[in-house]
Image: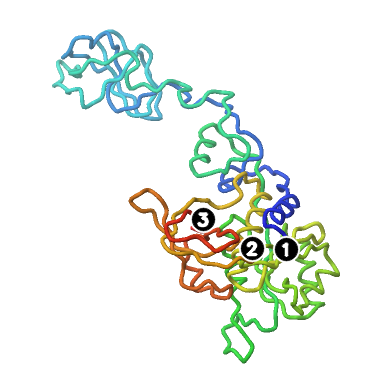
Amino acid sequence: MTPLEDAQAFVLGSCPALPPTSVPRAESIGLVLAEPVVAAEVVPPFANTAVDGYAIRSDDVAAVPKVLVVVGEIAAGAAPDRAVGPGEAVRIMTGAPLPPGADAVVMVEDTELLPTDGGVERVQVNASVHQGAAIRSAGDDVRIGDELFPAGMQVTPAIAGVLASVNARSVLVHPRVRVAVLSTGDELVDDGAPLELGQIRESNKTMLAALLAEAGCDVVDLGVVRDDPDELERVLRGAAADSDAIVSSGGVSMGDYDVVKHVLRAIADMTWMQIAIKPAKPFAFGRLLGKPIFGLPGNPVSSIVSFELLARPALRRMMGHRTLTRTHLVAVSDADLRRSPDGKVHFMRVNGEFADDGRFHVRPVGAQGSHQLAATAAADAMAVVPDGDGVPAGGDVAVLMLR
């Protein structure tokens, strides 16, 4: 059997990042930067006030209370039309540019508007402020030439906001992987028709399409392909020509009599593996027309485990991600995780929560069979149980989070 680490290294080494492309800023959210983002503008572009209040000279309010003459008003988006002289104040709104002559802003809460005196508006300042108070200087957040974000960082909504603030209208990113997903087999029913003896409902493709979308891929659902070699070859060749990668389930076990193996052996460069894990021992990986093909096991739980350990990390690497796997934790098992030695690492599905001790505590879900998807669907994580007799209750166990 192939050690999991060797299989992962082989697959990852065959799936380099897709060539970068320039996209409009609005289309970059969720994608990974292919080069650093360097600021070409300052933020904020001018000195402005952080509060609603009055722009003043700090020397004028060294002793308070102090009455000043209000000589103007500046709203956000407006430009000052005069300077602030000694004994004067300008009413100013948050974000508005600081007028010449002013070196501080006093909050409106620390002032009292007085009755006009001969048509002159006056304000009483009740708190002293130091020079620079409540002022955001030009370039206080970003300066020209600052490296804002490194290559390899995923664009979030907040990052997109920063890009807008420095007028980065487009960015160089790795594109989403376009992945074709299909299920094969005459036994699969996906149209809601009554089942005949020997038939089952299609579920793997539905599940894998959602997992691919969750991983950030663009999904091409090819449906269920019947056990017809010519039809399967046509679908696979079309998928390789139209997509960046292909994910299929079923037909990769050693004893399978399946058209999938027959067709892929004839048209693709494939490696068939028996990986030292349970579930998901059978796995196939190869290339068709230069595009990666991930052949996952047919049992639904095995398909999930194989996807999480092998396909998902490789597809994330193709999209430029630096963090390829889901979060790993060292948890406490609140129940025995029993197993027998068999030369494999077991991935047991567990539910868990953080306890008062600050640690993540887990318990196995009720059923661990590779065909028992209903129990696995509610699992929070997979416990990584090494070869041996298992982990006793109260013992530490590594877990791979699924949520």
Of the two numbered discs 2 and 3 in the rendering, the one whose residue sits closer to the viewer: 2
Q: Nearer the viewer, residue 314 or 73?
A: 314
Label placed on residue 1: 1
- Which residue is at 56% across, 74% downward? 369
Say what secondary structure mark 1 lies in: loop
Q: Is residue 217 left or right of residue 142?
A: right
Looking at the image, do the residues carrying marks 1 and 2 touch, with CB atoms under 8 Å apart?
yes
- Which residue is at 50% across, 39% downward? 161
- Which residue is at 78% across, 61% downward? 286
256 relative to 118, above or below: below
Distance, label 1 to label 3, CA atoms, is: 23 Å
Q: Quadrant of residue 362?
A: bottom left
Distance, label 2 to label 3, CA atoms, is: 16 Å
Q: Which residue is mark 3?
A: 399
Query: If you read the primary sequence from the N terminus, does the residue marked by circle 1 or circle 2 appear first?
Result: 1
Q: Quadrant of residue 218?
A: bottom right
Q: Nearer the viewer, residue 205 or 327?
A: 327
Give, as a three-letter code, the residue at label 2: Lys
Q: Which residue is mark 2?
A: 344
